[in-house]
Amino acid sequence: MHIFRFIGSVVEEMKHVSWPNASQTRRDTSAVLTTSILFAIFFAIVDYAVQAGLQLLA
């Protein structure tokens, strides 16, 4: 069946994948978290500024 051939090729391909080590994973995770937090702060500031601007117009 085609599905068994597909699964076999996936298993074979996964043997060639180079996985990151623990320090690389920590570094990448901290970069993602830092970026997410900075974007959240930025959008919170923009949201507050837009709300304040709209209240001035009302």
Image (tube, rainbow, N blue to C red):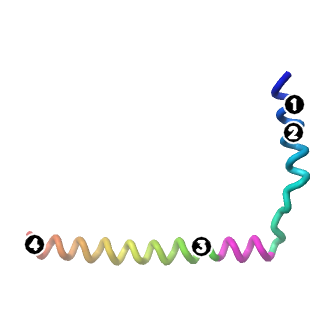
Q: Residues within 10 Å of mark 4 (few under 14, many from 20)?
A: few
Please state which of the two labelled residues, at mark 2 or mark 3, is closer to the viewer. Answer: 2
For mark 3, give the secondary structure: helix
Residue neighbourhood size for the residue with mark 3, other residues' Cα within 10 Å, grouped as few (<14), some (14–19), many (≥20):
few
Task: Give, as a three-letter code, the residue at label 1.
Answer: Arg
Q: Is residue 18 above or below residue 46?
A: above
Mark with earlier residue (4, 1): 1
**Contact between labelled residues 3 and 1, with CB atoms less than 8 Å apart:** no
Say which residue label 2 marks.
9
The span from disc 4 to disc 2 (Cα, nearest Å) is: 62 Å
Q: In the rendered structure, which amino acid carries the disc numbered 4? A: Leu
Rendered residue at 10%/72% (across/down): 57
Numbered tag placed on residue 5 in the rendering:
1
Q: Find numbered disc 1 in the image and state the secondary structure of the residue it sits on.
A: helix
The residue lying toward the viewer, choosing from 42 and 1, is 1
Of all residues, the one furthest to the left in this rendering is 58
Q: Measure the C-alpha gap from mark 4 to mark 1.
A: 65 Å
Question: CA separation, marks 1 and 3?
Answer: 39 Å
Residue 52 in percent (x, y) is at: 20, 76
* Quarter of the rendering containing residue 19: bottom right
Residue 41 on image: x %, y %: 43, 77
**Distance of label 3 from label 4 (alpha carbons):** 36 Å
Task: For mark 4, give the secondary structure.
Answer: helix
Q: Name the residue that disc number 3 marks.
A: 33
Tags 4 and 2 in contact by the CB under 8 Å rule?
no
Earlier residue among tags 2 and 3: 2
